[in-house]
Amino acid sequence: MTGIVLVWAFGFTLNIVVLFALILVAGMLVDGAIVVSELADRHLRDGQTPHEAWLNAASRMSWPVIASTATTLAVFIPLLFWPGVVGQFMKYLPATVILCLLASLAMALVFLPTLGRLFTRTAAASTSATPEEATTSFGRGYRHLLARLLKHPAWVLLIALLLMALLYTGYARFNHGVDFFPNVEPDSAQVLVRARGDFSAQETDAIVQRVEAKLSGMSEVRALYARSFAVPNEQMGNDVIGMLQFQFIDWHERRPAQAILDDMAERAGDIPGITLEFQEQEMGPGGGKPIVLEVSATNPDVADAGVNQLTQLMRELGGFTDIQDNRSLPGVEWRVNVDREAAARMGTDVTTIGSAVQLLTTGLQVASYRPPEVSDEVDIRVRLPENWRSLDQLERLTINTQRGQVPISHFVTLEPAPKVGTLNRIDGRRAITIDADLAPGYLADERLGALMAAGSDSLPDGLMVNVAGEQEDQQESMQFLASAFLIAIGLMALILVTQFNSFYQAGLVLSAIVFSTAGVLMGLLITGQAFGIVMVGMGVIALAGIVVNNNIVLIDTYNELRGQGMTPGEAALEAGCLRLRPVLLTAITTVLGLMPMVLGINVDLFTPALGFNALLPSGGHRCRAPSPAGSPSPPR
């Protein structure tokens, strides 16, 4: 609650990233409280009063709890400086986690002991000197196993290192590639209608209406919005003449979005002369197509040849769909050539001829008008009737001169020429952009690597190909996360050396990070998922701050027992047994806090309904509570 209030005080909206951060941190918030309350419970069983038990527990565990919280904060602080669009999208997560962890620190060391003192009854002292962990079969089994392992520490370490090396080697051999951001089931999609030709506004609208008629009436589409473009939209493509947007019904009542879009493509596939490009709703940071290449060369002909070769390679390799480039579409324009000498003999000039030509094209501006309720002026133009606006009419057009009405054809000729397009420049150089979508089952990083390998020997000399778009953001995020991970390790090492006054023990705690990352790779192999740069990379960094917490508590207890005169082996055994319960509780609560996201659980308290796999692209299923007998089901 304190974290939510602080998030509101900082002006953050309750967006999906903030909600994700609250779920992520939920299992971590209770770690300090568990450690303090477990020690207080132990003191109570030793016969201390509630006041003494909670005061001694909070005082004894204050530095371990502060150190463990500080190491977790250390891994999230560098994430506040995440650059680029991805950083603007994800910055709410580290900020929310930091605020909530600071609140949990105050809860564990101040509010929890106070509430524990108020509501704890005096407990009877335990008559047995044996720790509670040793009175259960699980505790006795753990103690026996730990005692045997401590007799052969070198073999245990060697086996652990071999298992870790096996996991790293196996992942390097059998990994499922790299992904930028996870794909989830979208709520909406859009279709771009592409056609080439000089269409009028009425013609483009008729084509879009024909596509709309084909795609209307699908029960899985809640709403449909269609729009035609009289003027080409350069951001979408010069050949885009229209767009249709769809809003799907709830995910648990329909097929996956990809299956619906495939059905749409089949329905509208018999319309000649057009190309339909289906795009699902983009989730997460970034935008546009996942594959974007910037092609440039000193010689424009080399650049054009390189673009043609790259697009051909994409089609041959497979996995690329909706391949487009931003070169100007081929077309014909009519150039009006004026014989200035002949026009001067007839008593006219180029300005007068230009005004006459405007009557056939965009219209001749004669005045402007600004309505009182608006700030922009409106042009008032005069044009010939629509059926007179043709090339033949230009030859019949006459101009009033000193010699009377003179046909414009006496000093004006029409010449067809290639249409002049738009030149695109990036960093001062002329460049052509190629973009493409990915077919289902392919990864952008893998397909891009295959394309570059196939074109490394065959592309023309002097051709420069730069990767942009999502892959550029991916590389930027990879470099930042790697730097943030190293900075986090350095901050944690500084905190641990300050806490333990020992480089060896600090390194021992940090070694848990190496073993935990091996577990991450094993989880990716088992689930068959790609390594997500944003989510998995951020998860690894967050894990680095989480896994050291239990080690801090363990080594702190070990140092205390060593100070009491125990040998290293005895201190290690007793520290493991004494901290077994809090270590298990903190690990289990952290895991349970993340399980709703792992299972994709969606709870609707108003229906009521319980959904599973709500965030997976393969869809999910929902279980509803039965309605009372004789009453209808709640309306949706």
Image (spheres, rainbow, N blue to C red):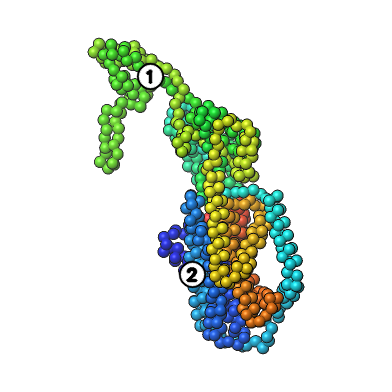
Secondary element under disc 2, as helix, strand or loop, is helix
What is the number of the mark on residue 103? 2
The correct choice, above or below, for 463 with respect to 149 in the image is above
Question: Residue 135 in the image: x percent, y percent?
Answer: 71, 80
Residue 370: name its quadrant: top left
For the residue pair 311 and 22, the one nearer the viewer reads as 311
Q: CA distance from mark 2 to mark 1?
A: 75 Å
Question: Could you tell me which residue is drawn at 73 percent across and 60 percent down?
Answer: 162
Q: Is residue 53 among what the camera can see?
A: yes
Question: Residue 441 in the image: x percent, y percent?
Answer: 64, 44
Secondary element under disc 1, as helix, strand or loop, is strand
The correct choice, above or below, for 100 with respect to 236 in the image is below
Question: Residue 482 in the image: x percent, y percent?
Answer: 57, 54
Query: Residue flagged by tag 1: what amino acid is it?
Result: Val
Question: Could you tell me which residue is drawn at 48 percent across and 42 percent down?
Answer: 225
Query: Residue flagged by tag 2: what amino acid is it?
Result: Ala
Q: Residues within 10 Å of mark 2 (few under 14, many from 20)?
A: some
Residue 264: name its quadrant: top right
Residue hosting label 1: 336
Mark whose residue sits in front, 2 or 1 = 2
232 relative to 340 in the view: left or right: right
